[in-house]
Amino acid sequence: MTQATRKNLVDALERLIKGEPDNRDLRLKARDGKLKINNHTVEKEAGLSVGALRNHEDIKKMVKAKSLNNSVEQSESAQSAIELLQEEVKKLKRERTQANNKKTEYHKLSKSHQTALATQAATHIKMVQELMEMIPVYERERAMDKVVRTRPDNVIDGKFR
């Protein structure tokens, strides 16, 4: 069974490299120029389950090498695998920088919202205190009980970090 599986995987890889897969979904992707060579597509083309390559390290290496070579051929700017990988590293670094910038921006925004919320809460407390002082002393306890009993689930814990 292992040799038959190995042969199926190698044949599937060769069909994908030629751009002539037997699998319907992969044929459609090849026609649209969106076919990628990776472990999943090789398994799919071979008609095997996901993870069928886990016991075939040599074929995984072949897939990785062919995928890289195929990417270099399709690239307009890279002439070698190293240049292609360097471009990908640059792209990932740019994306990481953008993500960090967004993170910083959102963190500052959350801090400003936290400050505004604290200000509003302080104003609210002050207002409630002043309103309570307007209620006669003998009715305050009953009013306070009413305030406490109304919607205790309407309070949000403000610990954001």
Image (cartoon, rainbow, N blue to C red):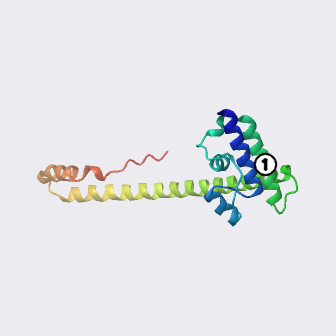
The x, y position of residue 98, in whole percent, is 67, 57
Q: Residue at x 70, y 34 (%)?
A: 3
Q: Residue at x 69, y 43 (%)?
A: 8
Which quadrant of the structure image shows residue 54? top right
The x, y position of residue 37, in whole percent, is 71, 51
Q: Is residue 41 in sight in this rendering?
A: yes
Q: Residue at x 78, y 48 (%)?
A: 66
- Seen from the viewer's position, the closer of residues 150 and 18 is 18
The x, y position of residue 55, in whole percent, is 66, 33
Q: Is residue 133 left or right of residue 47?
A: left
The number of discs equals 1
Asked if residue 95 is positioned above or below residue 48 in the image, the reply reads below
**Where, quadrant-wise, is the N terminus in this rendering?**
top right
Check disc 1: other Cα within 10 Å, few if <14, some if 14-19, many if 20+: some
Going by the picture, which residue comes out furthest to the left? Answer: 138
Q: Is residue 127 left or right of residue 93?
A: left
The disc labelled 1 sits on which kind of residue?
Answer: Lys
The x, y position of residue 65, in whole percent, is 79, 45
Q: Is residue 97 left or right of residue 134?
A: right
Q: Is residue 93 in sight in this rendering?
A: no
- Seen from the viewer's position, the closer of residues 160 and 28 is 28
Q: Is residue 107 left or right of residue 40?
A: left
Asked if residue 158 is positioned above or below residue 134 in the image, the reply reads above
- Seen from the viewer's position, the closer of residues 61 and 137 is 61
Name the residue that disc number 1 marks: 66
- Seen from the viewer's position, the closer of residues 71 and 132 is 71
Asked if residue 40 is positioned above or below residue 135 in the image, the reply reads above
Going by the picture, which residue comes out furthest to the bottom? Answer: 32
Q: Secondary structure at mark 1?
A: helix
Q: Residue at x 68, y 52 (%)?
A: 96
